[in-house]
Image (tube, rainbow, N blue to C red):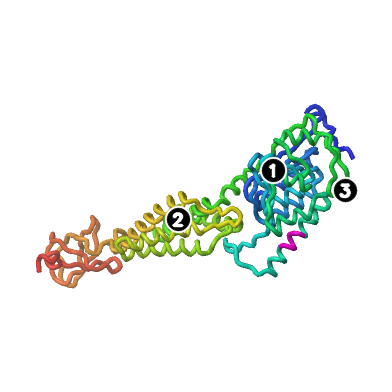
C-alpha cells in the first residue's frame, strides 16, 4: 500500500503534510485530549504522518491508555520522537513511545523506568507483594499487547516494569525497542521518506515525505487555560484566595465581590483536585492555619497563634501536592509569598469584625438612643410633648417636667415615640 498526499491542488504544490504535536510535561487528561484531537485533525487533513515530540516524566495510567488507544487506531501513521537532546520518555512515556508506528529517539535521551506506581492521597503506600505482582502483570500484559504486533522486543521492554530499568537511546536501538536514533525532527523525516512501515493492523505503508509541510498542532485556548491552572502553585493560590474571599464575605456581608471571586477560585481548586495528587494532610494544615488566625484576632496571644498559623499554612502548602513521578509540589517561593499576606489579612479582617460589634449603631432608630435633642414646648411629667432631635420633630415623654428650650437625652425608642430625660439628670457630671 502506498501512502500518497491528498489529491487537492494545494497539497500537490506544497507537498505532503506532517502534523506535529508536542507531549511535554506529565501525562494527564488535558494532554490526552490534545493528542486525541490532534490525531483526529490529521485524519481530516489527510496528513501523511503525525509526529509527536515527547519529553515527559510519565503520568496517569488512564490518560496514557487513552493516548495509546487513539495512536493504535489512527488512520494516519504516528511517529513518536523523544526530543530534544536531554529529554526523556519515562514511565507512561515509555509505553507511548513503544506504541507508535515509528519509535525514535534523539541522541542523549533516555526512556524506561515504567513500573506502575499506586498513589493515594498524594503519597505512595506500602503494598504487599501479591498486589504489586498483580499490578505489574497487568502492566506487562498491556505492554505486550502492542509491542509484539509492532515487532519490538517485549522481553527487554518488560524489564522497565519488573526492574524499573531505564535505557539510553543506543540501548533502546540495540535492544530492538525503537526504530531509529536521529539528530533532530528534520533528520527523522528525512530518514523516513520512502521507508515502508507496518501498521498495527498489519498493512504495509510507504511514507512519502519529500518536501513535507510541517504543520504544528497547538493546544486550544481552553486546553491552554486548563493546563495552566492544573499546576501545584496555581492550585494553592486558588485555594487560599477562595478561602480568603469567602471569609471576607462572611465577615463583611454585602461586599459581594470577594464572595464571587472566592467562590469561583474554590470551584477551580476543586477542579484541580481531580488531576493533582492532593495530600489531605496539607489541606488539614491549611484549615488549622485559618483557625489559628481567627483565634489570634479574637483572643490576642502576643503573636503566638499568628506565628503558628503562618507555620501551619507554610507546611500545608509544602505537603499539599506531591507527585510520586516528579516530586513536584508547591514551590517554596509561592508558599512563603502567599502565606504571610494571607495571615495578615485574615487577622486584620477578624479584628475589624470584632471591633465593629462594639461600635454604636449609626443608622435606623437605634442610633437615636443617646442622642441629644431640644424641647420645643414645655414637657410635663409623663405627658407627650415635642422635641427636636437631628432636625426632626418627635413625640416625646419625660418622667419630669422640662422647660422649653432645655436639652434632653434620648433613653429609649418605642415606635415613633421617644423617652427622654433632662441632660442635667442623664449626665454623670451632674450627679
Q: Distance between the residues labelled 2 and 1?
A: 44 Å
- For the C terminus, the quadrant is bottom left
- Exactly how many numbered labels are in the figure? 3
Say which element carries label 3.
loop
Any part of residue 27 in sight: yes
Q: Residues within 10 Å of mark 1 (few under 14, many from 20)?
A: many
Any part of residue 33 in sight: no
Task: Please indicate whether residue 206 sits to the left or right of residue 355 in the image.
Answer: right
* Picture coordinates of residue 317, whole percent (x, y): 48, 57
Region rendered in magenta? 136-140
Determine the residue positioned at 45% across, 55% down: 245
Task: Indicate which disc, 3 or 2, sits on the residue closer to the N terminus.
Answer: 3
Instruction: Give the label on residue 245, or none.
Output: 2
Tag 1 residue? 82
Tag 3 residue? 202
Say which element carries label 1.
strand
Amino acid at each position: 500500500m502506498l501512502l500518497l498526499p491528498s489529491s487537492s491542488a494545494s497539497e500537490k504544490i506544497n507537498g505532503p503534510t506532517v502534523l506535529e504535536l508536542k507531549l511535554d510535561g506529565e501525562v494527564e487528561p488535558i494532554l490526552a485530549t490534545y493528542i486525541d484531537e490532534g490525531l483526529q485533525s490529521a485524519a481530516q487533513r489527510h496528513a501523511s504522518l503525525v509526529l509527536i515530540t515527547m519529553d515527559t516524566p510519565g503520568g496517569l495510567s488512564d490518560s496514557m491508555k487513552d493516548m495509546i488507544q487513539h495512536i493504535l487506531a489512527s488512520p494516519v501513521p504516528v511517529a513518536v520522537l523523544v526530543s530534544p537532546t536531554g529529554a526523556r520518555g519515562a514511565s507512561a512515556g515509555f509505553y507511548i513511545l513503544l506504541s507508535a508506528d515509528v519509535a525514535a529517539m534523539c541522541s542523549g535521551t533516555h526512556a524506561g523506568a515504567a513500573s506502575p506506581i499506586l498513589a493515594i492521597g498524594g503519597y505512595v503506600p506500602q503494598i504487599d507483594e501479591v498486589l504489586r505482582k498483580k499490578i505489574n502483570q497487568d502492566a506487562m500484559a498491556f505492554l505486550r499487547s502492542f509491542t509484539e504486533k509492532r515487532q519490538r522486543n517485549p522481553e527487554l521492554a518488560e524489564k522497565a516494569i519488573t526492574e524499573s530499568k531505564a535505557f539510553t537511546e543506543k540501548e533502546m536501538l540495540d535492544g530492538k525497542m525503537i526504530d531509529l536514533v536521529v539528530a533532530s525532527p528534520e533528520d527523522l523525516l528525512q530518514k523516513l521518506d520512502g521507508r515502508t512501515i507496518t501498521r498495527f493492523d498489519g498493512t504495509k505503508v510507504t511514507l512519502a515525505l519529500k518536501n513535507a509541510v510541517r504543520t504544528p498542532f497547538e493546544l486550544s485556548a481552553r486546553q491552554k487555560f486548563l493546563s495552566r491552572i492544573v499546576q501545584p502553585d496555581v492550585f494553592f493560590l486558588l485555594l487560599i484566595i477562595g478561602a480568603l474571599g469567602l471569609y471576607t464575605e462572611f465577615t463583611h456581608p454585602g461586599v459581594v465581590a470577594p464572595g464571587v471571586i472566592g467562590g469561583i477560585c474554590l470551584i477551580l481548586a476543586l477542579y484541580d483536585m481531580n488531576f493533582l495528587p492532593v495530600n489531605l494532610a496539607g489541606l488539614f494544615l491549611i484549615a488549622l492555619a485559618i483557625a489559628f488566625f481567627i483565634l489570634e484576632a479574637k483572643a490576642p496571644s502576643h503573636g503566638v497563634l499568628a506565628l503558628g498559623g503562618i507555620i501551619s499554612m507554610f507546611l500545608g502548602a509544602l505537603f499539599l501536592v506531591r507527585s510520586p513521578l516528579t516530586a513536584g509540589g508547591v514551590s517554596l517561593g509561592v508558599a512563603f509569598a502567599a502565606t504571610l499576606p494571607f495571615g495578615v489579612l485574615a487577622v486584620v479582617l477578624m479584628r475589624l469584625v470584632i471591633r465593629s460589634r462594639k461600635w454604636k449603631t449609626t443608622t435606623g432608630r437605634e442610633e437615636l438612643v443617646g442622642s441629644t435633642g431640644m424641647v420645643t414646648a414645655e414637657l410635663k411629667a409623663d405627658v407627650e410633648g415635642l422635641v427636636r432631635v437631628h432636625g426632626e420633630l418627635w413625640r416625646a415623654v419625660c418622667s419630669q417636667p422640662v422647660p422649653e428650650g432645655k436639652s434632653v437625652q434620648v433613653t429609649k425608642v418605642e415606635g415613633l415615640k421617644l423617652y427622654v430625660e433632662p441632660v442635667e439628670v442623664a449626665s454623670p457630671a451632674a450627679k
